[in-house]
Image (cartoon, helix red, strand yellow):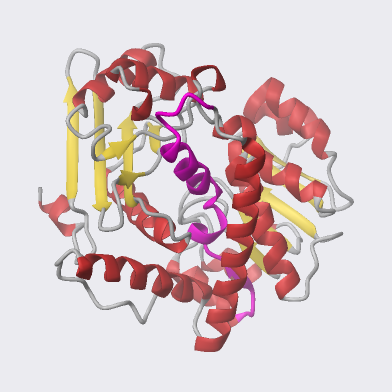
Amino acid sequence: MSDILALMDGWGPEKVVCVADHRTGMRGVLVLDNTSRGMGKGGTRMSPTLTVSEVARLARTMTWKWAAVDLFHGGAKAGILGDPQAPNKEEILRSFARALANEVPREYVFGLDMGLSERDAAIMADELGERGAAVGLPRALGGMPYDELGVTGFGVAEAADAAAEHIGLGLAGARVAIQGFGAVGTAAARRFAELGATVVAVSTAAGAVHDPAGLDVEALLKLQAEAGDAAVVEYGGTRPADELLHVECDVLVPAAREDVIGTDIAGATTARLVVEGANLPTTPEARAVLAARGVTVVPDFIANAGGVVAAAHSMTARNSPFVPDPGQIFTMISEKLRANAVSVLDEARRGHVTTHEAALRQAQERVRAAMQLRGQRAPEVSRAG
């Protein structure tokens, strides 16, 4: 209990729900961080190394992400401790959904994160007998299949394009390295190629592939669809996965896990622009090193907010008989994320602070205003990031 209490500060969490089922072996957690701007919404992940503090950190990121895009939901995250490839995964998912029936969908709506797919969202919604219990449902159930459409990765590339133009880099011809070639990384690679960038390296858990002259993105996407993480090996990649973060590039996109860029990589990367496709991929110490070297960073809750824009659209239409229009959603993501990226870079320059500090201040000001209007005691806006 002391560890959970240590997670709490003036912003949240408001509620931490730990659940377990001894019959299925299910163990999971839901963290509602701050719902002053609306009901809790955030992805649900499944991982064999999941911790409560990990979910709490991600829930806090969701609080800032919703505020940064100025959409009215609250920060939340859920997670299941377990192997996403477990043969009894469906049984575990159904048990998890039942255990949170008091919170879902009144206080929280399931979404997709690492280890879960559209089919998994369908299972949890089915267990609760409520289509509105989850977003990211398959199209056959009237949902918006985020992974299939690649909304988050699309937004990462759009934010990168706006930021690159803003700093005078220009994305056409720029060398891009993408760590993580899952739902986010593949969609980002596709959009980067469409925007004229040269994708020179990608990595998965199986390894990395690097070609300074540029990779065949379409061939890689085809292999990824057929072989998953082994796509890079099938393509011809034999380099260790962690070497990707050291390749020469102009734009570096960490799109896998938290805390992968430390001070060593921050001090050595040739990238002029780091675009955080994953949540929390850079450590605070690394961000300080990057800022000192003049490397521009587009923060995670600015760059990878395409998923929340799509989720907000789906949340609005979740009880509608009409399937949301993907074209309209892509337009919304592009406009919102490009404007936010430029706004944060401008604010950082004006305030002589890092981009993370600028983005955090903006998000905190919005959350603080909502808390005060609800009669809650609100913390002071951070001045240290």
How many numbered callouts?
0
Q: Residue 162 in the image: state x and y as whole percent.
A: 69, 65
Q: Determine whether, in the image, residue 292 is placed left or right of residue 10.
A: right
Q: Position of residue 285 (x, y in %)?
A: 45, 71
Residue 355 visible? The answer is: yes
Q: Which residues are magenta?
A: 293-322
| Residue at the image point whose x is 64% and y is 74% from the top | 295
The quadrant where residue 184 appears: top right
Residue 6's spot in the image, x, y percent?
Answer: 17, 58
Residue 297 among those drawn in magenta:
yes
Front position in the image: 251 or 265? 251
Residue furthest to the left = 1
Q: Residue furthest right?
A: 213
Instruction: Tell me residue 367's x, y (percent).
Output: 31, 65
For the point 15% across and 66% down, the residue is 376
> Where is 223 relative to 200, above or below?
above
The verdict on residue 311 being magenta is yes
Which residue is depicted at the point 10% across and 53% down?
2
Q: Is residue 335 above or below residue 255?
A: below
Asked whether the viewer can see residue 243, the reply is no
At 47% across and 37% down in the image, what residue appears? 314
> Quadrant location of the C terminus?
bottom left
Q: Is residue 265 above or below residue 51?
A: below
